[in-house]
Image (tube, coloured by chain):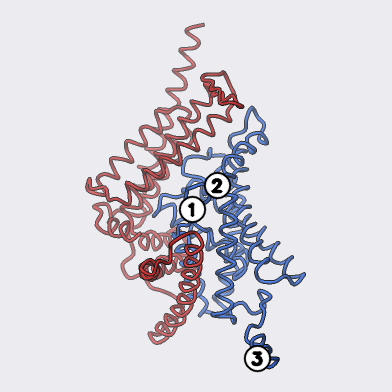
Chain colours: A red, B blue
């Protein structure tokens, strides 16, 4: 989490409008979801990967590689199940006694499409996450009139997560040194003790934070003195153009497929 | 287990958003009212959210060899109720989607519904029912956390089955999805139940004031004093 935060603060895209980047990411995601051809998610994947590579300055930290690999495995299993449950013209049949598993042509296509959509989605969202510090994104939500309580709660949860994670790390090392994770029984016992300690410490931390804020004349609002760049009409038009182009490409491919079928007839 | 980015068609993604948003708004209204009446609660609620997020980073071994993490919604339901849990789950799911590539933005509505609404609601019903018949801490917490976790996965399997029905039949698809996920998810629901029984047991000893009126806790000090008098 800290690595992601560091990458986001060092990204060359950091000063771009967070909502602008979000609308671009969303247009790529929605265009991929609406597509019936694998070409559109593939284009989205290439665009997302180039942006991600540039955002991380072509240095993929271990955390991103692990996230991508873990994601790929989950996507593969999910897409495989979707391929298996989709009925249609049989393509492959596997005799796994006592079961016979059949993958249909439609199932294989849908499974591949979903897999590509998922990989595109993660790549595009990683581009957004590695180029936008989360507090910046939360503060930019004020521009679309998101209630201030939600914005502040989001920023506070984010900030406090770092403090709690630091404590968890310390507790983990201390427990590990005392063989606290040896065997299942010890592992559960230590984990639950750690959870209680983190919880009670978080309550103490809340009380101390409140006292510190009161001492600094806290009136119930956290002011943001350097608001992030706002969402401009340019960003909206650009995102819309990207979406419409991808949608048009999909329609062209689908129509040309139908045209080919008609010509064959 | 969350539905990953790109796994739901647009119409289903919108449908789950439409179902989740009213509950999250209700939760937000509750939080706003709470903050207006008790401004000092802002820090406590924020730290409860941070706690859920941190808790989800604690990896646990599963019987099938994989590892997973607690959802934390069962515990949050007991401590804060369904409405506030839904808002906290929404924020945590956004963090997980953006920072851990776990879940997604287009599937956020579906994940909020399964992890932030359905799971806590089933857990809350079990918790209220068992508290009414004055069950002890151990069975109440175990059943609440177990059901909250299991309901999350049943709803997730249902969401996928509705999006990808087998030959138009969502039930066949549901059995396939749930059958595959059950191998890891049922043991994980048991593990989460056990973990939170230990959690609340330690919490009842360390800070019994936090559970006052929420769970039936044996007065250990009185028991020890009684035993000493008898002895």
Q: Percent position (x, y) of residue A155?
A: 41, 66
**How would you rate the neighbour count of disc 1 (Cα within 10 Å): few for under 14, some for 14-19, many for 20 or more?**
some
Q: Residue at x 53, y 60 (%)?
A: B89
Q: Residue at x 68, y 91 (%)?
A: B231
Judged left or right of residue A80, residue A125 is left
| Residue at mark 2: chain | B
Judged left or right of residue A188, residue A172 is left
- Where is mark 1, residue-wise? B68
Mark sitting on residue B228: 3
Question: Which residue is farthest front?
Answer: B231
Question: Which residue is farthest bottom?
Answer: B229
Question: Which residue is farthest top?
Answer: A265
Q: Is residue A129 above or below residue B72?
A: above
Mark sitting on residue B32: none
First in sequence, mark 1 or 2: give its number.
1
> Of helix, strand and loop, which one carries label 2?
helix
Quadrant of res A71: top left
Judged left or right of residue A9, residue A171 is right
Q: Residue at x 56, y 57 (%)?
A: B191
**How would you rate the neighbour count of disc 2 (Cα within 10 Å): few for under 14, some for 14-19, many for 20 or more?**
some
Q: Percent position (x, y) of residue B194?
A: 58, 62
Q: Percent position (x, y) of residue B58?
A: 45, 60
- Where is mark 2, residue-wise? B184
First in sequence, mark 1 or 3: give its number.
1
Query: Which of the two discs, 1 and 3, sits closer to the camera?
Result: 3
Cα–Cα gap, marks 1 and 2:
9 Å
First in sequence, mark 3 or 2: give its number.
2
Count of numbered labels shown in the rendering = 3
Q: CB of mark 1 within 8 Å of CB of mark 2?
A: yes
Cα–Cα gap, marks 3 and 2:
47 Å
Q: CB of mark 3 within 8 Å of CB of mark 2?
A: no
């Amino acid at each position: 989490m800290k690595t992601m935060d560091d990458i986001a603060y060092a990204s060359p895209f950091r000063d771009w409008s967070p909502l602008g980047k979000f609308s671009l990411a969303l247009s790529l995601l929605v265009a991929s979801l609406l597509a019936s051809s694998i070409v559109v998610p593939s284009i989205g994947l290439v665009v997302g990967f180039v942006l991600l590579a540039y955002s991380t300055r072509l240095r993929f930290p271990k955390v991103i590689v692990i996230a991508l690999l873990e994601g790929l495995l989950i996507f593969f299993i999910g897409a495989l199940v979707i391929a298996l449950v989709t009925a249609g013209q049989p393509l492959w049949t596997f005799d796994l006694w006592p079961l016979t598993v059949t993958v249909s042509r439609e199932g294989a296509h849908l499974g591949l499409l979903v897999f590509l959509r998922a990989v595109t989605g993660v790549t595009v969202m990683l581009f957004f996450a590695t180029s936008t510090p989360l507090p910046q994104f939360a503060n930019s939500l004020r521009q679309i009139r998101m209630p201030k309580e939600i914005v502040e709660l989001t920023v506070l949860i984010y900030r406090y997560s770092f403090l709690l994670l630091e404590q968890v790390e310390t507790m983990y090392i201390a427990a590990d040194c005392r063989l606290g994770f040896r065997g299942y029984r010890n592992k559960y016992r230590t984990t639950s003790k750690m959870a209680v300690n983190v919880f009670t410490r978080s309550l103490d931390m809340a009380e101390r934070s409140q006292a510190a804020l009161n001492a600094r004349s806290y009136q119930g609002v956290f002011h943001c003195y350097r608001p992030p760049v706002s969402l401009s009409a340019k960003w909206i038009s650009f995102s819309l153009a990207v979406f419409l182009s991808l949608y048009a490409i999909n329609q062209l491919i689908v129509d040309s497929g139908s045209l080919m079928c008609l010509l064959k007839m | 287990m969350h539905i990953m980015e790109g796994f739901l068609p647009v119409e289903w993604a919108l449908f789950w958003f439409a179902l989740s948003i009213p509950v999250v708004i209700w939760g937000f209204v509750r939080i706003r009212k709470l903050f207006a009446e008790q401004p000092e609660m802002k820090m406590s609620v924020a730290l409860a959210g941070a706690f859920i997020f941190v808790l989800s980073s604690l990896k646990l071994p599963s019987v099938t060899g994989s590892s997973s993490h607690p959802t934390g919604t069962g515990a949050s339901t007991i401590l804060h109720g369904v409405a506030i849990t839904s808002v906290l789950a929404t924020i945590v799911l956004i963090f997980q989607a953006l920072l851990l590539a776990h879940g997604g933005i287009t599937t956020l509505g579906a994940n909020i519904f399964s992890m932030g609404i359905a799971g806590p609601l089933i857990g809350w019903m079990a918790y209220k029912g068992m508290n009414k018949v004055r069950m002890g801490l151990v069975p109440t917490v175990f059943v609440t956390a177990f059901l909250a976790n299991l309901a999350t996965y049943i709803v997730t399997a249902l969401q996928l089955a509705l999006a990808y029905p087998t030959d138009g039949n969502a039930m066949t698809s549901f059995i396939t999805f749930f059958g595959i996920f059950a191998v890891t998810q049922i043991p994980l629901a048991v593990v989460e139940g056990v973990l939170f029984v230990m959690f609340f047991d330690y919490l009842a000893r360390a800070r019994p004031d936090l559970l006052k009126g929420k769970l039936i806790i044996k007065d250990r000090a009185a028991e020890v004093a009684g035993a000493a008098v008898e002895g």
